[in-house]
Amino acid sequence: MYEIANPENNVTFAIDLSKTWTTSNLDLVYTPRPPASLGLNDEVLWWDEKSNTIYCFGGERSATNWAVDAISTPPESIWGFTPDGHGSGTWTEVEIVGPSSNTPFPSYILRPAGGASTVVGRSAYYLGGDFPQLSSLEIDLPYAVMDVAPGLLTFNFDNLTVTNSSNVAKPYNTSDHWIPPGTGLQKWVPPGRMIALPSFGTSGIAVVIGGGDLSQADFLEAGGYFDNISIFDTYSQKWYHQTATGAIPEMRSAFCAVGVQDRDKGSFEIFIHGGIVDNKLDSRNAGADQIYILSLPAFQWVKRIGVFDMTALQWKDSYDSTAEAYTSPAVIKELYINKYTPVPCQIRNNNDPTIL
């Protein structure tokens, strides 16, 4: 499922993964979105299998020819897409349960853009991001100026509530950057990534990689956050951190990340690819062409070049709908056969529930 953030092409594209296809015969199905549900840049999508709904949240509007007033920014909302089983579906606005019937969407929560997000269990999580002028009608900052979005947002699929875990909701234009109390977490800003590990812990965990710290002069070069992995335990609602070893990726922004469980549940791998390495968009950005794999529970990084098939470690130009479930590639299995030495997980508070 893919969004086009443009008022003239406000449509949703979908690919049927129940069929085998190649890049030359790929058939896209598109569904128009209602005008009130303008597709935004940096939106996140949350799939709720129980309700057969794909929720859409966050993002900022496009500015035609960089004209700020070219397109009206929609009010804060969450929209849901219900697939029809044939590639299309229906978009409807979700009735969020707020503090009262007069405030259906919490007034202290503004629309962020570029944050890290994932779904674990019956909740979706959205961490960090920023508040550019084009994300919310409530933002009164100069164009191209933004501030860090506060807190960890949680959207509950069962009762349709949106909450923020920060103790005090700070205004969007404050110079302070929110840090979870007592955790020592870095000030997460775009574009870090959050990956769900549903089989770890009591009710699943979320792993955060990448991101930056706006307290540094150049937050994209101030630290990679690929060697110090932050972990959110959804059961205890507490943060932890784990040191990773191996081929640590270079600091990068706007990268792609996907997590997959080995079919034997012996390990869980997070694959990252692309992005902007060392703030370069040209041929010097060669590091983005490489694939890095973080394997858990070893918390070790492995670097590979030319990876697409996550088991065979091969680039391919086709999609096989009959392919077997993911199995950890040989290079990952060797980590565990050779009895890796784990680095203890460090807790960010005084309690010590088991995570891994």
Image (spheres, rainbow, N blue to C red):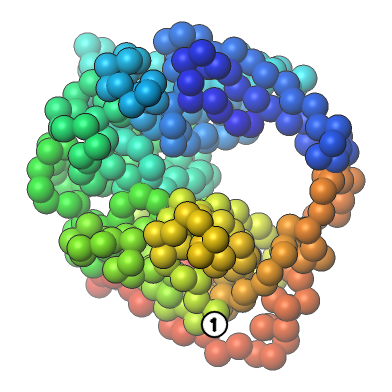
- Write down the quadrant of residue 216 in the picture: bottom left
Using residue 43 as the reference point, say whether residue 128 is left or right of it.
Answer: left
**Camera-nearest residue between 158 and 140:** 140
Q: Which residue is drawn at 46% across and 84% down?
A: 343
**Camera-nearest residue between 25 and 238:** 25
Q: Residue at x 62, y 74 (%)?
A: 303
Percent from the top left, x then y, of residue 10?
53, 16
Percent from the top left, x then y, of residue 184?
23, 67
Q: Is mark 1 on a helix, strand or loop?
A: strand
How many numbered marks, from 0 up? 1
**Camera-nearest residue between 37 and 239:** 37
Above or below, 68 relative to 247: above
Percent from the top left, x then y, of residue 133?
24, 30
Q: Which residue is drawn at 85% across and 40% down?
A: 22
Above or below, 68 relative to 147: above
Above or below, 104 relative to 24: above
Q: Mark 1 points at which residue?
A: 246
Q: Which residue is farthest front?
A: 283
Q: Can residue 281 be seen in this view?
A: yes
Q: Is residue 200 visible?
A: no
